[in-house]
Amino acid sequence: MLTAFAVAHLAPTTWLAGAPSTSAPEAATGSLIRRGYFAAAVGGAVTAGLYGLATGTSVQYDYSPYLKWTLGSTLPLAVCAAVIAATAPRIPTNALPAWLARTRPAILHAAIATTGIYLMRAALTITAPVDLTGMPGLVGSAGAAFLGVATALTASRSHTIRTITAPGLGIGYAIVFTNDTNGALTVGYLVALTWWAVRLTGHTLRLAFPTAGEALRRLMDGRTT
């Protein structure tokens, strides 16, 4: 799903980078955004479903637990991508470069999280590299620490908050990692990833419908008064 987000981000970014700075073709950029993020929503969800089905087939077990993980983690991101596809073309042209910079997926954070999850699973199943080191507890705790750091980096854009929370979550995840907590730690990262997509969607809506946001704030102020 993150790969689909990255591809959807790349197409309009490349188009704007090659367009004349004085007359960016708004219609063409909006069309690329709409098509890219709609394709990300559909393609990411379909790929997740096929991956869950393929995993169930390979291990010859019921599909349900695998589809629960693949679709459960992907569908919220797909919904966000669909909302972005519908609303982002309304963003003013002069605001598009800053918006596209903000939509860039945090690939490094995702790579850290993927490494952490792989090491945790290796520690629980005694597969490489755990079977080579003979230290499943240490490898699993290291993987959990990676996942904790990735969760903190994904959950916030503030450098201050990241600096404070990343070491704490990394140490905390490493301490509490067990076979029973493995799933909960992974869900924690997926929640942070979903929050990243929700924040991006909210930011897109504010740019696309600035008057609606102002009207809502005035309404809330009036109710408070």
Image (tube, rainbow, N blue to C red):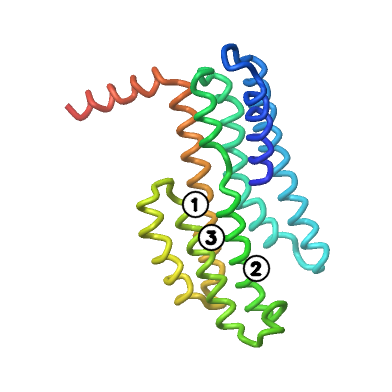
Dot placed on the residue nearer the N-terminal end, 2 or 1: 2
Residue 45 in picture, x, y percent from top left: 69, 44
Q: For residue 61, what is the image quadrant?
A: bottom right
Disc 2 + disc 1, Cβ < 8 Å: no
Residue type of the residue flagged with mark 2: Tyr
Q: Which label was assigned to residue 116?
A: none
Q: Earlier in the sequence, mark 3 or mark 2?
A: 2
Q: CA distance from mark 3 to mark 2?
A: 14 Å
- Between the C-alphas of marks 2 and 1, the distance is 18 Å
Q: What amino acid type should be assigned to the residue bearing mark 1?
A: Thr
Residue 26 spot, x, y in % from top left:
60, 15
Q: Please rate how many residues cluster around mark 1, counting C-alpha atoms within 10 Å: few if below 14, some from 14 to 19, many from 20.
A: many
Q: Residue at x 35, y 52 (%)?
A: 160
Instruction: Label 1: state its secondary structure.
Output: helix
Q: Residue 174 appears at what percent x and percent y?
A: 48, 74
Badge 3 density bin: few <14, some 14–19, many ≥20, Cα 10 Å: some
In the figure, is residue 77 to the left or right of 169?
Answer: right
Residue located farthest toward the bottom when viewing the structure as drawn: 134
Q: Nearer the viewer, residue 28 or 48?
A: 28
Total numbered circles = 3
Q: Describe residue 197's horizontal placement relative to residue 125 as left or right.
A: left
Counting from the top left corner in percent of width and height, residue 1 is at: 66, 46
N-terminal of the pair, mark 1 or mark 3, is 1
Q: In the rendered image of this protein, does residue 153 appear above or below residue 101?
A: below
Crowding near the residue tagged with mark 2, few <14, some 14–19, many ≥20 C-alpha atoms within 10 Å:
many
- Residue 187 numbered mark, or none: 3
Q: SS class of the residue under badge 3?
A: helix
Q: Which residue is denoted by mark 1 in the rendering?
A: 154
Q: Amino acid at mark 3?
A: Val
Left or right? Give the position of 81 relative to 176: right
